[in-house]
Image: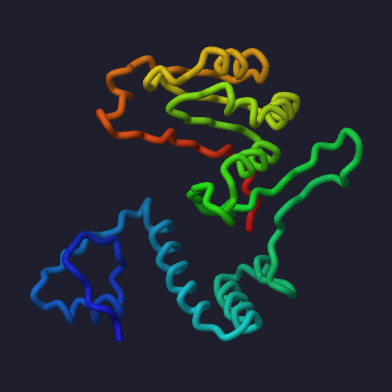
C-alpha cells in the first residue's frame, strides 16, 4: 500500500508505484515533463539510490545487504566495486605517526553529508569539529558574518599547521554591526596567509531590529575518496 500524494511540485520519475499513488488522488491533475538528456544520469542515479536504500532497510542482516549490493553491482558489470568481506569503509589514509609527520584527525561528523552543529551536550562541538577539519583539509573556505580575536585564538595551533602545510585559506566576512575586529583580520592575513575579502555594505548586512542573526560557517573542504 502506497501513501497518497498531496498537491504540490515534484521531481519524481514516472513508475508503476507513482501511477498507483496518482490513482488515489483522482481529483488532482498530474503534469509530466521530459528529463533532459544532460540531467538523466543524475536523476536516474538518485532514483535508483532511493529504491536501493528502501530495499536495504528491508534486509534482515549485514550478509543479506551485502549480497543484494553485490548482485546489483554485478548487474551493471561493476565487479571491481563489489563488497569484499565485512562491510567497512576507508576512513583515514596516512603515514605512520612519527616526529615531523603530520597527523590526520578524522572529524566525528560524516564527510559525505552536511551536519548541523549546535554545541548541545553529548553532540560534537563546533570547535572540536573545526580543529579536526583543519587538520585534514586540503583547502579552506571560511564564510562568516564577523570574525573576532577570541575565535581565532581557539584555533591557533590548527591554523599554524594549516599555514605550515601550505593549504589555501580563503575568508569572506563583513562589518556586520561593527563586530569584526581588526586584530583578528590582521592575524589571519599576516600570520596565517589568508586571502581575505570584507564586505562593508553595512545596510545590507545589518539584521532587522530586535533580531539576532547567527554567523554562517562553511566547514573546510576535504579530499573525498571514493566510499
Q: Viewer-proximal residue, 200 or 2?
A: 200
- In this view, which residue lies farthest toward the right? 99
* Quadrant into which the N terminus falls: bottom left
User: In the picture shown, does residue 85 fall above or below 129?
Assistant: below
Residue at image position (72%, 25%) is 160
Residue at image position (68%, 66%) is 80
Residue 100 locus on image (x, y percent): 88, 33
User: In the picture shown, does residue 53 fall above or below 194?
Assistant: below
Residue at image position (30%, 65%) is 12
Residue at image position (51%, 16%) is 181
Residue 79 locus on image (x, y percent): 66, 70
Residue 38 locus on image (x, y percent): 37, 51
Which colour style is shown? rainbow
User: In the picture shown, does residue 24 fall above or below 205?
Assistant: below
User: In the picture shown, does residue 179 fall above or below 113?
Assistant: above
220 with respect to 159 (left or right): left
98 with respect to 124 (left or right): right
209 with respect to 78 (left or right): left
Quarter of the view holding residue 32: bottom left
Q: Viewer-proximal residue, 120 or 200?
A: 120
43 with respect to 118 (left or right): left
Quarter of the view holding residue 167: top right
Tally the marks: 0
* Quadrant into which the C terminus falls: bottom right
Residue 155 locus on image (x, y percent): 65, 31
Amino acid at each position: 500500500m502506497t501513501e497518497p500524494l498531496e498537491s504540490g511540485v515534484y521531481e519524481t520519475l514516472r513508475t508503476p508505484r507513482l501511477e498507483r499513488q496518482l490513482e488515489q488522488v483522482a481529483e488532482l491533475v498530474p503534469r509530466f515533463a521530459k528529463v533532459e538528456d544532460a540531467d538523466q544520469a543524475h536523476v536516474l542515479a538518485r532514483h535508483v539510490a532511493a529504491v536501493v536504500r528502501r530495499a536495504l532497510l528491508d534486509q534482515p542482516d549485514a550478509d543479506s545487504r551485502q549480497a543484494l549490493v553485490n548482485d546489483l553491482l554485478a548487474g551493471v558489470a561493476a565487479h571491481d566495486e563489489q563488497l569484499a568481506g565485512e562491510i567497512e569503509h576507508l576512513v583515514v589514509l596516512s603515514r605512520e605517526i612519527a616526529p615531523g609527520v603530520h597527523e590526520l584527525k578524522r572529524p566525528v561528523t560524516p564527510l559525505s553529508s552536511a551536519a548541523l552543529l549546535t554545541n548541545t551536550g553529548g553532540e560534537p562541538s563546533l570547535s572540536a569539529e573545526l580543529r579536526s577539519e583543519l587538520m585534514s583539509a586540503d583547502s579552506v573556505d571560511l564564510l562568516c558574518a564577523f570574525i573576532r580575536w577570541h575565535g581565532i585564538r581557539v584555533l591557533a595551533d590548527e591554523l599554524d599547521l594549516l599555514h605550515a602545510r601550505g593549504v589555501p585559506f580563503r575568508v569572506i566576512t563583513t562589518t556586520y554591526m561593527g563586530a569584526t575586529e581588526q586584530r583578528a583580520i590582521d592575524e589571519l592575513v599576516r600570520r596565517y596567509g589568508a586571502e581575505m575579502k570584507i564586505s562593508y555594505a553595512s545596510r545590507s548586512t545589518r539584521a532587522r531590529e530586535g533580531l539576532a542573526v547567527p554567523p554562517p560557517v562553511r566547514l573546510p573542504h576535504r579530499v573525498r575518496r571514493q566510499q
